[in-house]
Amino acid sequence: MDLIDVHTHIVPETFPVYSLPVPEKRWPCMQCSSPTEANILIDNKPFRALDHRSWDMEKRMDDMVQAGVTRQALSPMPELLSYWFRPDAGLEMCRWMNQTIATAVNDKPTQFSGLGIVPLQDPQLAAKELGRLKADGFSGIELGSNINGDLLGDPKFNDFFAEAEAQQLSIFVHALHPVGAERLRLTPELIPFAAFPLDTALTAISLIHAGVPDRYPNLKFGFSHGGGAIVSLVHRLTQGWKLTNGFEGRVPKTPMRYAGEFFYDSLVYDPGYLSYLANDFAPGQVFCGTDYPFAIMEADLDGFVATADVKNKNSVRYESAARFLGL
């Protein structure tokens, strides 16, 4: 039976030497300690220890067989989104990563789909890249939950969303440099566990409040980590919607209705939570996601979905992913 994992990441074994005239000190490089282990350096400092699962497609496919996963959607490690670069440097990094993913997808099109990245610090430049991604066979785009602090509901991204809808490219939103991280400076290890889910939820809510789902009704949005904290926040937002007459008429449907039309991955770690997400909160809109190959990944995806009391397991296993990826 098919099992599609939409939330996986890739890091190339090497990065190009930076060649633009204005330096970017956060340009990444790989420091390999063996054929199977490396550190990625950013600003000449170790950012994350990696192993060959990040770049070795044969190893990745072996792991997929062991896990019963029939297809992965490949997206870059979020720190490679590179919104903090000048637009020309960001474009260079995006094209390098997209070429890396396109090569893997073209080599094994029945095992892999691609989610590319674009330099959204310049929304017009990013929009121009979408036609290239579509021509190269990508299924969608990975976006950060904020673009240098700006949530995705910001009107400056409207033309970008219009072009993504026109190109029939889905959008997978991943937490990145979250709000509140500065308050966790004494306990930075809590940032990925506590601040990431908040940022994902805030950007989803900003899209609802800004009217993006109504403006671009055919644009598919998917959110990592089960949408983060969206389940609790959107209930409160719906109460606010009632008290303000739909936020002064700007939001015609309840926030709960919009939230139920987004896609979410299954990376919530608790079978009961997954059951609520798939059965009640967003039926038919939940697909599998693991965060492979990082430490926080769901190690037994098949078993986790099997354990959850989900009414339509096929929807979670592959049907929702197939719709999201345009398979």
Image (cartoon, grey):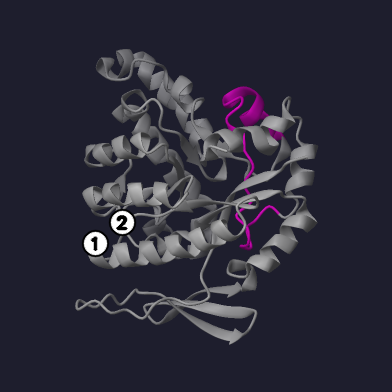
Residue identifier under label 1: 87
Residue 303 within the segment the image draws in magenta = no
- Looking at the image, can residue 273 be seen? no
- Looking at the image, can residue 131 be seen? yes
Q: Residue placed at 34% from the left, 74% from the top?
A: 26
Quarter of the figure that contains the C terminus: top right
Image mark for residue 304: none
Q: Residues within 10 Å of mark 2 (few under 14, many from 20)?
A: many
> Which segment did they paint magenta?
272-298
Q: Amino acid at mark 2?
A: Pro
Q: Position of residue 180 (x, y in %)?
A: 39, 52
Q: Residue placed at 40% from the left, 53% from the top?
A: 178
Q: Which one is earlier in the sequence, the residue at label 1 or at label 2?
A: 1
* Front-lying residue, 203 or 119: 119
Evaluate if marks 1 and 2 touch, with contact meaning CB atoms under 8 Å apart. Answer: yes
Q: Circle 1 sits in a helix, a strand or a loop, which is it?
A: helix
Q: Residue placed at 71% from the left, 43% from the top?
A: 3
Q: Position of residue 46 (x, y in %)?
A: 48, 78
Residue identifier under label 2: 119
Q: Quadrant of residue 283?
A: top right
